Image (cartoon, rainbow, N blue to C red):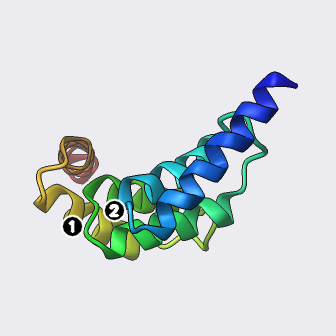
Amino acid sequence: MVVQKNLEKVRKLYEAAETTGDINAVRNFGQIYFESSGVQPDYVKAFQFFQRAAKFGDAAAQFDLAIAYFQGKGTERNDGEAIQSLLKSADQGYSKAAKLIADMKRVHKEHVRE
């Protein structure tokens, strides 16, 4: 149960950081729930944390939000919202977002040719 106690401490630290406006903490807290890092996955909570951080322009959170929309985790699947969030992230230079957009364009081109 040492792991559970440590995760509880981490959760409390992130919650405290969130109240001070630490956007990285908000996003990281969402990732804990999304990736099930030692806790039961809670995609709704993860989505809410990603949304909060994304509203403040956090590029990584915008990317995470896009993935949640694409996968329909924590929210209804919404490709339009996912793409908008992905583009916002890429526009800020977030390399994972830019790579995913490039991959999507490549796949789309391959399917159009067939």
> N-terminal of the two: label 1 or label 2?
2
Residue 25 % position (x, y) = 45, 53
Q: Which amino acid does label 1 sit on?
A: Lys
Say which of 35 and 103 sits in front.
Answer: 35
Residue at 23% over, 59% down: 89
- Above or below — where is 6 with respect to 55? above
Q: Are marks 1 and 2 in contact (CB under 8 Å)?
A: yes
Can you name the residue that lies furthest to the right here?
Answer: 1
Q: Is residue 112 left or right of residue 67?
A: left
Residue 31 % position (x, y) = 53, 47
Q: Which amino acid does label 2 sit on?
A: Gln
Can you name the residue that lies furthest to the top here?
Answer: 2
Q: Is residue 107 left or right of residue 11?
A: left
User: Total marks drawn?
Assistant: 2
Residue bearing the label numbered 2: 62
Residue at 56% over, 70% down: 48
Q: How crowded is mark 2: few (under 14 residues within 10 Å), some or many (20 or more)?
A: many
Q: In this view, does 57 lie to the left or right of 93?
A: right
Residue bearing the label numbered 1: 88
Displayed quadrant of residue 100: top left
